[in-house]
Image (cartoon, grey):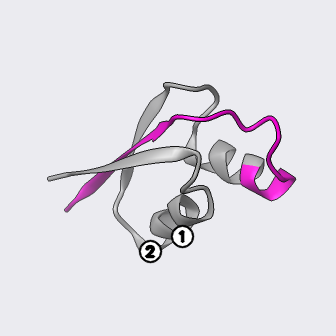
């Protein structure tokens, strides 16, 4: 199963509360931090909601 590596690249300070909550749901707390998540429709939706704040890489 494929995996997504999600890295926060921008600050969440000036973002809306729902976007802050989405970053927290992904497990991201600070700029430069990376997490690996299963490639599922739910996680793809999270990433789409905060696409301007994160970088995503697919890992096999």
Residue at the far left in the pictured view: 60
Residues shaded magenta:
1-19
Spot occupied by residue 20 in the image (x, y as percentages of width and height): 75, 46
Instruction: Determine the secondary structure under disc 2.
Output: helix
Q: Residue 42 vs residue 35: left or right?
A: right
**Label 2 crowd (10 A; few <14 / some 14-19 / many >=20):** few
Residue at the far bottom in the pictured view: 41
Q: Residue, x 80% and y 58% (percent of image)?
A: 18
Spot occupied by residue 29 in the image (x, y as percentages of width and height): 64, 30
Q: Residue, x 62% and y 26% (percent of image)?
A: 30
Residue 14's disc number: none
Cα distance between the residues tagged 1 and 2? 6 Å
Q: Residue, x 73% and y 54% (percent of image)?
A: 19
| Location of mark 1 (residue) | 45
Determine if the magenta segment contains residue 8. Answer: yes
Spot occupied by residue 22 in the image (x, y as percentages of width and height): 67, 53
Residue 36 location, quadrant? top left
Q: Is residue 34 above or below residue 55?
A: above
Q: How many marks?
A: 2
Residue 41's disc number: 2
**Label 1 crowd (10 A; few <14 / some 14-19 / many >=20):** few
State the quadrant of the N terminus.
bottom left
Residue 10 location, quadrant? top right
Marks 1 and 2: CB-CB under 8 Å?
A: yes
Residue 12 location, quadrant? top right
Q: Is residue 2 above or below residue 9?
A: below
Q: Is residue 47 above or below residue 24?
A: below
Spot occupied by residue 14 in the image (x, y as percentages of width and height): 82, 41
């Amino acid at each position: 199963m494929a995996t997504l590596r999600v890295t926060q690249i921008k600050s969440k300070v000036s973002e809306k509360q729902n976007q802050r909550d989405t970053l927290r749901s992904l497990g991201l707390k600070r700029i430069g931090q990376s997490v690996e998540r299963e490639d599922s429709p739910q996680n793809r939706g999270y990433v789409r909601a905060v696409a301007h704040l994160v970088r995503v890489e697919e890992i096999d």
